[in-house]
Image (cartoon, grey):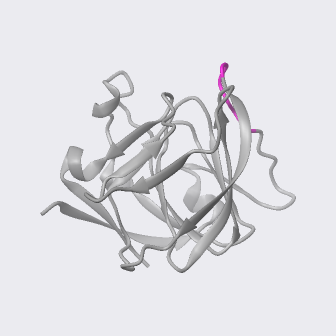
Amino acid sequence: MPQVVKVKVQPLTAEAFGPYGIVMEEGKRIVFPEVEEGGRPALEFQRSRARRSGNHALAHFAVHFSYRQTFIPVQGSMILVVAPPPRNRQARRQDYELDYERLAAFSLSPGQAADINKGVWHSAIVPQHECLWVNATRKDAGEGVNRTRINERGKVEWRDPRPYIEFVDIRERDDRIVEVEL
């Protein structure tokens, strides 16, 4: 059995989210998408559904260093789980540090926006029903909308994987899962 790392959900506030990125607040801050050369800022609608089992455990995280990413729920809510960028960026991608002690989970309601810094580990779950959200992301020329699915063994399969994003199965790599406490 993998080790369970528990993280309690907290409201999205600028102060609490500060180590991981920026909370967009009306009249307080403008966020300019940052995308390194070779890519372009892109906006896409994503629809995510709550798991049938009601399970709030995560085993899959993403990390990328070439752009900031913004999550904006439009209908429904989501929980964004984040950890600081790895300190060992010079390591092989599969060996990047994930600081389990500094994991945080934030509840995002429709109209809230969280912009994560480059290199921040992240994953998301939908606590109830489904969530339609705007994904402000990076796309290279010719890329379409990326999709994922869970295969019969419970592993995430990425269609059209992007080479500038590292997707990590922490259950496989670290024998851990993250359990989100609502």
Q: Nearer the viewer, residue 12 or 148?
A: 148
- Tell me which residue sits at (82%, 56%) in the image: 28
Q: Nearer the viewer, residue 148 or 10?
A: 148
Q: In which quadrant of the rendered image does the N terminus lie?
A: bottom left
Q: Nearer the viewer, residue 29 or 144?
A: 144
Q: In which quadrant of the rendered image does the C terminus lie?
A: bottom left
Q: Where are the magenta residues, as a range? A: 33-38
In terms of image quadrants, where is residue 112? bottom right
Note whether 93 is above or below 30 in the view shown.
above
- 54 horizontally vs 171: left or right: right
- Tell me which residue sits at (55%, 79%) in the image: 129
Q: Main secondary structure of the magenta part?
A: loop
Is residue 35 within the magenta segment?
A: yes
The image shows residue 172 at horizontal and vertical percentages of: 22, 48
The image shows residue 45 at horizontal and vertical percentages of: 70, 56
- Tell me which residue sits at (31%, 48%) in the image: 169
- 158 horizontally vs 132: left or right: left
